[in-house]
């Protein structure tokens, strides 16, 4: 029998911030585990004294790809290390062969970095078609209705950032395959906290940046491109890391790497790669299923406590569409802002987005964190 996971010990060892702050804002930025901070300190020391490098920066980058690959159910060689989500989306948008009149379908109220690279193609006659939302959900049938014979790609988030709505990815992947549409998925709000399977999803491209649920830092992002999709997406920002010859072979042959490294231009954010490798080691030790279950339990406790309060839940509560994010509103933007400010004064961190107060619990949170937040909400709205 497997021993139960001691989340209290993990919290005490890896997240000392929990001694003071009820941190429920991982959808904005996650605290970094102690182990990750230690790795970065060692990496910074090597920057101060390059004689201490010993090839570790490349080793950490390999480890980061391997750990992300296991969480994505993807070959690590199909993962490129980039700088942010917008860059990843732009690599794909600019690398596709599109003609005037072609269409890209994106749900309304998506994260801006996912949208702008596609909107930028409108200068070349490509049209972005937004799927209208009604309430907390993005309806599958509305996505279907937005498709046309000119649709070339569907781009959306696995988990939407405002209220945590989680799409049925298998259903969407099958839809894209039937229509011959490129399927681009932003997993920024799910990689590291929810199970992901890009093979089962039939996803062509998956991207995420590292400072949220991967518990790393800004300036590092992952781009997965399937082998089939690589034939459709040409490299548009080539550099010495894109080709097999590297920087020493001066024949300047555009001999692309046979895998996703062709989409990397130069050296990646080595510190960021080391941070991802270290932080995801913790996720893998616990197990992604256990991570997701624990985070949901804390979110459920918040949800249960809100039932007798004068708030409206702005999250789709159907189990198949739940994630680690729970959003609610008092019905007033002013009151929501005041609530977030009051929580911050009490050392409780939550976020606020267009749909209301956003909570985002992780695996190291506990019931006390949830209760502290509920006490503030109760006091503010009485």
Image (cartoon, rainbow, N blue to C red):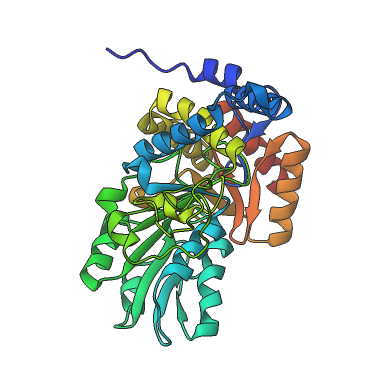
Q: Looking at the image, which residue is at 38% across and 65% down?
A: 233
Asked if residue 43 lies left or right of residue 157, the reply is: right
The residue most toward the left is 178
Q: Looking at the image, which residue is at 44% across and 37% down?
A: 296
- Circle count: 0
Q: Is residue 68 above or below residue 37?
A: below
The residue most toward the front is 251
Q: Looking at the image, which residue is at 43% across and 62% down?
A: 156
Q: Looking at the image, which residue is at 53% across and 62% down?
A: 237
Can residue 365 be seen here? The reply is: no
Can residue 300 be seen here? The reply is: yes
Find residue 255 and report its horizontal and vertical position in percent.
39, 56
Find residue 154 and report its horizontal and vertical position in percent.
38, 68
Find residue 279 and report its horizontal and vertical position in percent.
52, 30
Asked if residue 74 lies left or right of residue 24, the reply is: left
Find residue 63 and report its horizontal and vertical position in percent.
45, 31
Q: Quadrant of residue 350?
A: top right
The residue most toward the right is 345
Q: Quadrant of the N terminus?
A: top left
Q: Nearer the viewer, residue 351 or 115?
A: 115
Q: Is residue 55 above or below residue 147?
A: above
Q: Is residue 278 above or below residue 252?
A: above
């Amino acid at each position: 029998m497997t021993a139960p996971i001691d989340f209290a010990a993990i919290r005490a060892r890896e997240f000392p911030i929990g001694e003071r702050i009820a941190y429920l804002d991982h959808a904005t930025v996650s605290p970094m585990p102690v182990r990750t901070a230690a790795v970065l300190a060692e990496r910074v020391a090597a920057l101060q004294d390059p004689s201490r490098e010993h090839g570790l920066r490349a080793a950490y980058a390999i480890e980061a790809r391997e750990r992300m690959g296991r969480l994505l159910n993807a070959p690590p060689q199909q993962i490129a290390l980039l700088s942010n989500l917008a860059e990843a989306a732009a690599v794909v948008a600019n690398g596709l062969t599109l003609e005037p009149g072609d269409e890209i379908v994106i749900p309304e109220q998506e994260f801006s970095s996912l949208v702008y690279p596609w909107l930028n193609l409108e200068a070349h006659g490509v049209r972005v078609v937004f799927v209208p939302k009604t309430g907390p959900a993005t309806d599958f049938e509305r996505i279907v209705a937005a498709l046309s014979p000119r649709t070339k790609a569907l781009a959306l988030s696995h988990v939407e950032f405002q209220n945590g709505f989680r799409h049925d990815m298998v259903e969407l992947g099958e839809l894209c395959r039937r229509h011959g549409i490129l399927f681009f998925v932003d997993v920024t709000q799910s990689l590291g906290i929810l199970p992901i399977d890009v093979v089962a999803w039939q996803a062509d491209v998956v991207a995420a940046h590292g400072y949220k649920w991967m518990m790393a830092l800004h300036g590092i992002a992952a781009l997965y491109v399937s082998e089939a999709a690589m034939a459709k997406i040409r490299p548009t920002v080539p550099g010495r890391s894109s080709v097999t010859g590297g920087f020493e072979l001066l024949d300047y042959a555009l001999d692309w790497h046979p895998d996703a490294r062709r989409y990397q231009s130069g050296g990646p954010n080595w510190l960021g790669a080391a941070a991802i490798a270290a932080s995801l080691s913790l996720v893998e030790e616990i197990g992604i299923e256990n991570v997701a279950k624990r985070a949901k339990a804390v979110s459920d406790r918040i949800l249960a406590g809100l039932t007798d309060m004068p708030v409206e839940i702005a999250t789709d509560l159907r189990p198949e569409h739940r994630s680690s994010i729970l959003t609610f509103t008092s019905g007033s933007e002013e009151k929501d802002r005041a609530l977030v400010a009051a929580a911050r004064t009490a050392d409780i961190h939550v976020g606020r987005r267009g749909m209301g107060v956003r909570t985002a619990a992780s695996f190291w949170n506990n019931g006390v964190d949830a209760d502290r937040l509920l006490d503030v909400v109760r006091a503010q709205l009485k």
